[in-house]
Image: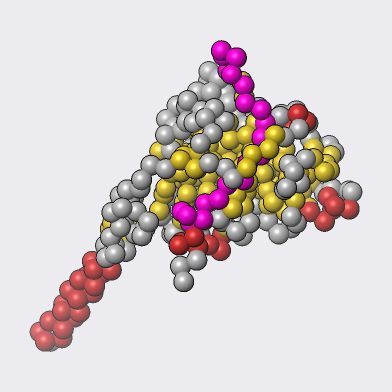
Amino acid sequence: MKSIESKYLLILLLSLQVSCHSSQPGCTDPLASNFDSSATEEDHSCIYDIVYVSPEWTMELSEQISETSGLILWDGVLWTINDDTDTRLYLLDTATAEIIGDYLLPGVVNQDWEEISQDEDFIYVGDFGNNLGNRSNLHILRIDKRSLISGDPSIDTIWFTYSDQYDLSPSQPNMTEFDCEAFVVFSDSIYLFTKQWVSGKSTLYSLPKTPGNHKARKISFYDMGGLVAGAAGIESQRLVVLCGYSFLVQPFLILLYDYMDNDFFSGNIRVINLSLPFHQVEGITTSDGLKYYLSNEYFSSPPGRSIPQQLHQLDLTEYLNDYLNPF
């Protein structure tokens, strides 16, 4: 009997030893200066050089979309929206940035459209801008792609509240932690990234991508040091890229990759600064994870500084090619 107990105790000790060795915290990104080849669990200790990236080209956009607030790339054409002026989807030529068409969404209101995303069958428009933190009608429009192209758009609504927001009393303008301007749509859910005006953090929430009333479930958060305003992702590659800007309107990208499940803040996190000072970058999209389109809305501030609405193309091959194409 003792020998059997000793045998099981030995197996238990060996299992614990294997378990301990199988989880080695450290920096798992080979592009970081402190990469640890023995690390098996990312612990956010990676150290990167501070870099600034310039667009390959920049083109001014039409005044019709001076408040461009999101981008998707579908069928070789860019699609964008204005954040509170009209209820149209605008189509842009990828080479000239000119408007080549638009689709009116009937029977809906644009209170504060802040993001556009898509999956195979639908386009999603996020009416969830919430600068006072008091909106009780946060929602995402879901537009059937085939019906839109046919000229008779079928539109559903996904209503939601934040699972951890208990007070809808209005705050001072731009002093809430429950604003949102960015989301991605993956096969199972919609994933929201908040724009937190006080802390500079972003909280990741998930909710079903089906019409109805839902609670956005809190997953995790990360200190961005600024304001997140757009998101793009490639689900199959475990890659999400956020765009935003600091409180001094210095734009940046946050690369999220090699994460666990869909907790996008659990993997490698790298900041890429953009050489576009005072550009309020709001939209981002990609088809391959290497080349990106970005858009900024019109921005003005005293004394007499103004930045027109623009479209940019950016190449991140240097920073993501080894991850996306390791062999």
Looking at this view, name the residue that lies furthest to the front.
56
Q: Residue at x 64, y 39 (%)?
A: 58
Residue 219 appears in the picture as rendered: no
Q: Nearer the viewer, residue 87 or 161?
A: 87
Q: Nearer the viewer, residue 164 or 120?
A: 120
Q: Residue at x 47, y 49 (%)?
A: 255
Looking at this view, name the residue that lies furthest to the right.
151
Magenta region: 301-320
Image position, residue 69 (x, y; %): 66, 36
Does the stretch in magenta take in 204? Answer: no
Left/right of residue 324 with respect to residue 31 in the rendered view: right
Image position, residue 226 (x, y; %): 46, 33
Q: Is residue 54 above or below residue 234?
A: above
Looking at this view, name the residue that lies furthest to the left.
2
Q: Is residue 309 above or below residue 126?
A: above
Which color scheme does this rendered protein use?
Answer: secondary structure
Q: Nearer the viewer, residue 171 or 35?
A: 35
Image position, residue 227 (x, y; %): 50, 33
